[in-house]
Amino acid sequence: MKGKIKQKLKALGVQLSAVVQIGKEGMSDTLIDSTREALQARELIKVHVLPNAVLDTKETIEALADMLGAEVIQVIGRYGILFKKKKEKSHFEDIL
């Protein structure tokens, strides 16, 4: 993904509320399924790794993105922004 596109997605992602929270249980099948559904519905989501999680934030978000075929747009602190474009009727056609 090109830099300008990533910048636009970062700007949009900063305003989002976290729809996925990863806690001490880590990445369960339920978490992965709910994240997949959120990506299919919204395309751009924010993920929060809670302080009680014993996992490294960046590694966790990257692993989750790899499992789902999504792209990591940004990781700051305990938050990450993921993007996966819909095959049809994307909300972000004008950006991409």
Image (spheres, rainbow, N blue to C red):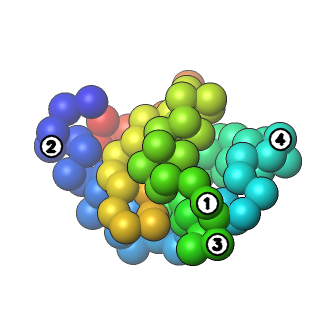
Give the Cα distance between marks 2 and 4. 34 Å
Residue occupied by mark 3: 52
Under mark 4, the amino acid is Asp
Marked residue nearer the N-terminal end (2 or 1)? 2
Please tell me whether mark 3 or mark 4 is closer to you in this view: 3
Q: Nearer the viewer, residue 14 or 60?
A: 60
Q: Residues within 10 Å of mark 2 (few under 14, many from 20)?
A: few
Taking the spot 62% from the left edge, 31% from the top edge, the residue there is: 68
Give the Cα distance between marks 3 and 2. 35 Å
List x then y, in percent, for residue 4: 15, 43
Q: Quadrant of residue 24?
A: bottom right
> Residue 29's mark?
4
| SS of the residue under disc 1 | loop
Under mark 1, the amino acid is Val
Q: Nearer the viewer, residue 41 or 78?
A: 78
Residue occupied by mark 1: 54
Instruction: Determine the residue located farthest toward the right in the rendered image.
Output: 30
Give the Cα distance between marks 2 and 1. 34 Å
Q: Are marks 3 and 2 in contact (CB under 8 Å)?
A: no
Under mark 2, the amino acid is Lys
Q: Are marks 1 and 3 in contact (CB under 8 Å)?
A: yes
Please tell me whether mark 2 or mark 1 is closer to you in this view: 1
Above or below: residue 94 compared with residue 2:
below
| SS of the residue under disc 2 | helix
Marked residue nearer the N-terminal end (2 or 4)? 2
Residue occupied by mark 2: 4
- Residue 66 in view, yes or no: yes
Q: Are marks 2 and 4 in contact (CB under 8 Å)?
A: no
| SS of the residue under disc 4 | helix
Marked residue nearer the N-terminal end (3 or 2)? 2
